[in-house]
């Protein structure tokens, strides 16, 4: 029996996934979580064979949770199931140790098959997304540039960002300027939107 944990913030979607997977003779849903922080705790408690994670969740997102689950339950295979098929998300998921990356509009039977393939040691990636990730190239932003852009995404002032990240205002301006140039934007707002659209933030 393959033991599966689900992390999805929308209760109806999580319930539907649990029901669908429960219909399979060799799959058992042994834990559920509504956000990334819960996912890490549940994975550490139940030690599933597979953790199926959404990306967009409150608190810690699925990509951050994936890396943490990998440390808390090293034998657990990570699968990302998301609405957002963005090339940057795929790269970040692979960096976080994910074995699979699937979009939610895939047929339901493909999910069960993908779980079995991952447990057998395969890597499963949505083909269209893999092609898009290859053509998009790597994320041009450094980790600090991503941090500063993300901190300013809500319209925070330079001073607010500096205080939150424990940086000087001049350093924040430099990182923002570099990020804006790298993504080919005219201002911070455009840079945030461009980076989010690619899955770089």
Image: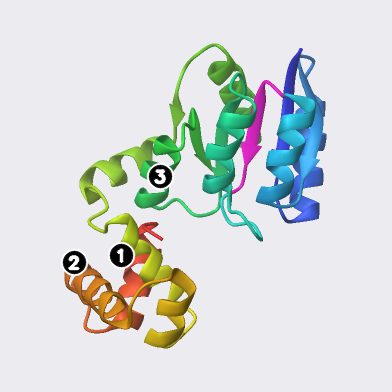
Q: Which segment did they paint magenta? A: 48-54
In the image, taking residue 66 as reference, residue 168 lies left or right, namely left
Give the CA separation, mark 2 to mark 1: 10 Å
Could you tell me residue 35's position as x and y percent? 70, 52
Density class for disc 2 (Cα within 10 Å; few <14, some 14-19, many ≥20) is: some
Residue 182 is tagged as: 2
State which quarter of the image contains the C terminus: bottom left
Could you tell me residue 155's position as x and y percent? 45, 85
Mark 2 and 1 residues: CB-CB less than 8 Å, in contact?
yes
Residue on which the image places disc 1: 145
In the image, taking residue 168 as reference, residue 28 lies left or right, namely right
Q: Secondary structure beneath disc 2? A: helix
Give the CA separation, mark 1 to mark 3: 15 Å
Mark 1 and 3 residues: CB-CB less than 8 Å, in contact?
no
Residue 45 seen from this side? yes
Residue on which the image places disc 3: 92
Residue 14 is tagged as: none
């Amino acid at each position: 029996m393959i033991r599966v944990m689900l992390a999805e913030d929308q209760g109806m979607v999580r319930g539907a996934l649990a029901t669908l997977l429960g219909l399979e003779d060799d799959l058992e849903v042994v834990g559920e979580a509504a956000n990334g922080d819960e996912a890490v705790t549940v994975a550490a408690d139940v030690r599933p064979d597979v953790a199926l994670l959404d990306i967009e969740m409150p608190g810690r997102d699925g990509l951050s949770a994936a890396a943490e689950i990998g440390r808390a339950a090293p034998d657990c295979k990570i699968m990302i199931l998301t609405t957002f098929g963005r090339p940057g998300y795929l790269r970040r998921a692979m960096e976080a140790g994910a074995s699979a990356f699937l979009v939610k509009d895939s047929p339901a039977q493909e999910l069960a098959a993908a779980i079995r393939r991952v447990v057998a040691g395969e890597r499963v990636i949505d083909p269209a997304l893999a092609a898009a990730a290859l053509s998009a190239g790597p994320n041009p932003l450094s980790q600090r540039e991503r941090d500063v852009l993300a901190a300013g995404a809500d319209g925070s002032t330079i001073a607010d960002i500096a205080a939150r990240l424990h940086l000087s205002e001049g350093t924040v301006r430099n990182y923002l300027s570099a990020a804006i140039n790298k993504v080919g934007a005219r201002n911070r707002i455009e840079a945030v939107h461009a980076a989010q659209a690619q899955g770089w933030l």
